[in-house]
Image (cartoon, coloured by chain):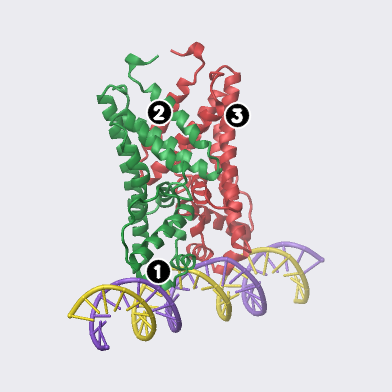
Chain colours: A green, B red, C yellow, D purple
Amino acid sequence: MSTTPDPDPPRRSDGERTHAAILDAAMAIASVEGLGSLTIGRLARELDISKSGVFAHFRSKQRLQQETVAAAGEVFEREVLAPGMQAPAGLGRVEGLCEAYLSYVDRGVFPGGCFFAQLIAEFDATDGPLHEAAAEGQSDWAGLLQTEIETAQSQGEIDAEVDADQLAFELDALLEMANFLATLHRDPDVTERARTAIRQRLATAAPASIRH
Amino acid sequence: MSTTPDPDPPRRSDGERTHAAILDAAMAIASVEGLGSLTIGRLARELDISKSGVFAHFRSKQRLQQETVAAAGEVFEREVLAPGMQAPAGLGRVEGLCEAYLSYVDRGVFPGGCFFAQLIAEFDATDGPLHEAAAEGQSDWAGLLQTEIETAQSQGEIDAEVDADQLAFELDALLEMANFLATLHRDPDVTERARTAIRQRLATAAPASIRH
DNA sequence: CATTAGTTCGCACGGTCGTGCTATCTAGCA
DNA sequence: TGCTAGATAGCACGACCGTGCGAACTAATG
């Protein structure tokens, strides 16, 4: 995983360093093959630790999965939300969030593409805590886009007639599709397709007074 | 799985009937939990057959997976391509294919949503025959949309300036997003969102001469 | 009736899974 | 120095995995 380097690495005990290393490997495996193919034995093999050594850090597979999702959430926050939210509230931030997501795909932050897109696809049709986690993550992200679209409307940057929820759906569709196709076809140009579509879509949503 | 009833059920030997029943169950499991959670023991349990009885029909797990994908391809052909292709070539068929896909999602043809969307998400980041199958399926579908868009352009139904590849990408994004969100949130209204977006997107692609 | 081909079963194998228990080692503190 | 808490290893367990083999049963063919 290639994340932006942490300028202030905290002092850690051996256990904490191992714990973090396990979660790093777990995120990488899960983003490529899904949480279902994440096994304790495999983590032990890849990290050259005994199975019990790995297990002791989580005491159940469920906890390992939970902590992996939480760790991925932190990565998403750092690599997408933080940079995206630096743009000024409103239209700029809508564009900033979209660009932050596409950049995160381009940079290959997770080797298998967006961790949460993978999570959604894997657990969309199941029940249980992982389904809830996936649904919640998706709702939060879509809700964030919607909120910023509404702010843009109140600032006169997007036409007030536009259905914010609908527009958020459409932008999200383009982002997720870019993630999947870039991964599937190993084609870095796909994100550019999404950029083009987003630019055009936002142009048609501009206030009627300044359109054309 | 709820498919349209076959008006002419072919005469089958016991073995053929069992074979088909196994593949039906396999498609259902795989669409919900992925091909990775498809196991011979589980099929045996659900169908009340011995493990060896299931295994004998395929002689390897790889073959079982291949045949499951092929069977899902036939379902997709029958439930999406055939109805969609009944529309007249060009813009009508673009709309027909989109509507056929959304209807296939609405009808819940596969209990876990579109089988191939699941396949793409599961194997987009891996290597091997299943990755190839997923990539090929996606390319064929997107290529079909693109071809019909180009036909529509040659018939003056879509502006000649439009990038057919780009438009196909955008329509596909809306369709796949509808599939994932309808499954994730168990919300049948999501497909209506996609219909709205597609209608609007195609309107902006209309020839300049008849726009506005 | 005897033979044969096809279908399914029971059983066994080696491997991996998640999980628990006990031992060993290492640091920091009294 | 001895004690304690934390980190890791070793080993065993029952369950399930894919796979192979031989036996039983069924239906069609001669």
Tag 2 and tag 1 share a subunit: no
Q: Which mark is residue B147?
A: 3
Towards the viewer: A10 or A26: A10
Nearer to me, B87 or B209 = B209
Up/down of A103 relative to A121, above or below: above
Task: Tell me the subunit letter for badge 1.
Answer: A
| Residue type at the position of mark 3 | Thr
Furthest-top residue in this view? B209
- Is B59 left or right of A187, judged from the image as shown? right
Instruction: Examine the rendering and report whether any part of residue A128 can be seen.
Output: no
Q: Which residue is painted at 36% across and 50% down in the image?
A: A75
Q: Which residue is mark 1?
A: A54
Q: Chain of mark 3?
A: B
The quadrant of the image that shows the C terminus of chain A is top left
In the image shown, does A152 or B32 lie closer to the viewer?
Answer: A152
Number of other residues with Cα within 10 Å of mark 3, as a class: few under 14, some 14 to 19, many 20 or more: some
